[in-house]
Amino acid sequence: MNSLNGKVAIVTGAARGQGAAEARILAEHGAMVVLTDVLAEPGAATAEQIGSKARFIHHDVASPAGWDAVVAAAVGDFGSIDILVNNAAIAPQLRLEATEPDVYDRVYRANQFGVYLGMRAVLKPMREAGGGAIVNTLSVGAVKGASSLFAYSATKWAVRGMTRSAALELARYNIRVNAVIPGFIDTAMNDDIPAKMRDELVRTTPMRRMGSPHEIAEAVLFLASPASSFVTGAELAVDGGMAA
């Protein structure tokens, strides 16, 4: 039921961490994968490691023209688009008072506007393919408050609403829209967190550890595959119980 043979996937923020793990597992299960990221060298290296089923495109998710180019390349090279994983995000650790308007706008464009652009960009090829699966990446900060992550949490809450609304609108086209909710995951995004805060996050996670990118990728595989064929508008928490 997890077979993705003949499917074509786009994964944003795929140069490293969760995105790289997601691209890798989709390819392992048969999909052709277009990896996108603003990090050109690690993105190209990840695609090369995956092999002939992958190609990398330098891509800013906040650029409408960039999305047009990614969609055209995916369809041109592989023939269709069946899966979109909106993984790209940034998370400056700032409280409300310290979040300047230009910073908030940058987070909004990467985390929320980019998801809107991505979902909108793949609608036509997914309808032409007879359906598809969109997986949006949320956060525990999208189900409860997150101190010192004001802009990040705000945009993830917004994507939560976008996911549910899109699921209702697109079900008629056999396009499923779901979300994965990572907890505290061992990725580069969390490398700058002070050791004291990292220890506290692990302590307050019921399973008492960080999650791995592969564990998020497994959840994305499920939501992107026929194994979840009657699932849409859902949120799958992979957080060690953090939001329970």
Image (tube, rainbow, N blue to C red):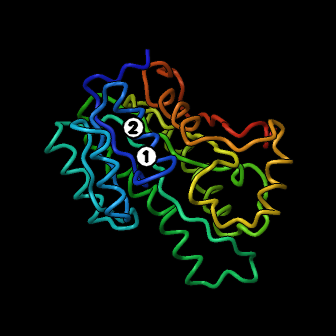
Q: Answer yes or no: do the residues labelled 1 and 2 have beta carbons within 8 Å? A: yes
Q: Secondary structure at mark 1?
A: helix
Residue type at mark 1: give it: Ala
* Location of mark 1 (residue): 20
Residue found farthest to the top: 1
The amino acid type of the residue labelled 2 equals Arg
For image coordinates 58% across by 79% down, the residue present is: 103
User: Which part of the image, by quadrant, shows the N terminus?
Assistant: top left
Q: Position of residue 178 (x, y in %)?
A: 53, 37
Residue beneath the point at 19% across and 50% down: 73
Q: Nearer the viewer, residue 41 or 116?
A: 41
Instruction: Kindly indicate the quadrant of the structure image that contains residue 175.
Output: top left
In the displayed structure image, the side of residue 128 where residue 220 appears, left or right: right
Please report the residue visible at 34 percent of the width from the left and 32 percent of the height from the top. Answer: 27
Q: Nearer the viewer, residue 156 or 222?
A: 222
Find residue 160 and report its horizontal and vertical position in percent: 61, 49
Q: Residues within 10 Å of mark 2 (few under 14, many from 20)?
A: many
The numbered disc on residue 49 is: none
Above or below, 98 against 34 in this view is below
Vertical side of 88 occupied by 54: above or below: above
In the displayed structure, does residue 50 sit left or right of residue 138?
left
Q: Residue at x 15, y 42 (%)?
A: 77
Q: Residue furthest left?
A: 76
Spatial separation of the CA atoms under disc 1 and disc 2:
6 Å
> Judging from the image, what secondary structure is the residue with disc 2 in?
helix
Instruction: In this rendered view, identify the residue nearer to me: 198 or 61.
Output: 198
The percent position of residue 240, horizontal first and vertical second, equals: 74, 37
Report the number of numbered marks: 2
Q: Quadrant of the C terminus?
A: top right
Using a 10 Å C-alpha cutoff, classify the residue at mark 1 as few (fewer than 14 neighbours), some (14 to 19) or many (20 or more).
Answer: many
- Check disc 2 and report the residue beneath it: 24
